[in-house]
Image: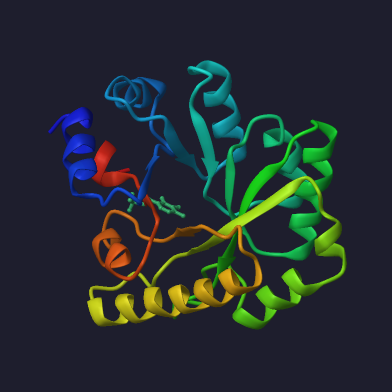
Amino acid sequence: MSIATNLNTIKATLPKNVTLVAVSKTKPNSAIIKAYEAGQRIFGENKIQEMSQKWEDLPKDIEWHMIGHVQTNKVKYMAPFVHLIHGVDSFKLLKEINKQAKKHDRVIKCLLQIHIAEETTKFGLDKNELFEIINSESFKTFENIQVEGLMGMATFTDDQKQVRKEFSNLKTIFNSLKQEIDTINTLSMGMSGDYKIAIEEGSTMVRIGSSIFGSR
Ligand SMILES: *Cc1c(COP(=O)(O)O)cnc(C)c1O
């Protein structure tokens, strides 16, 4: 199947309120251009250096989403152009994003990553840490970031009940966050293997790589 066909097939199944992030990590510019020509403008990368290179090389109307774990000392490289950072998992990182965004006179959109999986290897905050951050005095002074919602990754398992339970937990946290901040509107959950369940559980943004571009 071609990239354009894969993309159109997936897009046809997505509800209107669900945004598709085409995850192009490790894939060459030629593959991204195929998706671009089929109308896709939102791409996700997990390494800052690779994303920056692609931003330089490719059309400027692409929205680049950072979906991977972010090291504080690398924020400066994507601050000029990144559209949405999905994996914000500490106060320190948020503070650095605010600082770098200010240097470029930008407001950078962020999602806070919540740890929902059983695996201890996945990054993210728990519910208490989330509310500690957003209720802190300094959070209110960050004028160059806009927290738009939450992101999470389910356990890598065939047990669909488990995956559904984890997404449902994230949706519950999302709902309580929405009650505190009324601009919250994005729940990033779901990848190639589990995005259908994620949408049933309330996802508004899916991050799909291999089902579009082939395996990595
Ligand atoms: C790689 C990656 C994806 C896409 O995974 P696929 O299984 O290829 O769809 C989604 N989210 C994150 C955070 C990733 O690192």
Tell me the quarter of the picture where residue 69 sits.
Answer: bottom right
Residue 99 position within the rendered picture, expressed as x and y whole percent measured from the top left: 84, 45
Which residue shows up at 21% across the image and 28% down it? 4
Task: Residue 40: tell me if it is visible.
Answer: yes
The image shows residue 73, relative to residue 131, as above or below, that is above
Q: Quadrant of the C terminus?
A: top left
The image shows residue 18, relative to residue 112, as above or below, that is above
Which residue shows up at 34% across the image and 56% down it? 191
Which residue shows up at 68% across the image and 51% down it? 146
Residue 94 position within the rendered picture, expressed as x and y whole percent measured from the top left: 75, 56
Q: Quadrant of the N terminus?
A: top left
Q: Is 122 situated left or right of 106 in this image?
A: left
Tell me the quarter of the picture where residue 190 sits.
Answer: bottom left
Q: Is 190 situated left or right of 102 in this image?
A: left
Tell me the quarter of the picture where residue 6 sits.
Answer: top left
The image shows residue 104, relative to residue 188, as above or below, that is above
Residue 201 position within the rendered picture, expressed as x and y whole percent measured from the top left: 33, 71
Q: Nearer the viewer, residue 10 or 202?
A: 202
Which residue shows up at 65% across the image and 72% down it? 180
Residue 205 position within the rendered picture, expressed as x and y whole percent measured from the top left: 41, 53
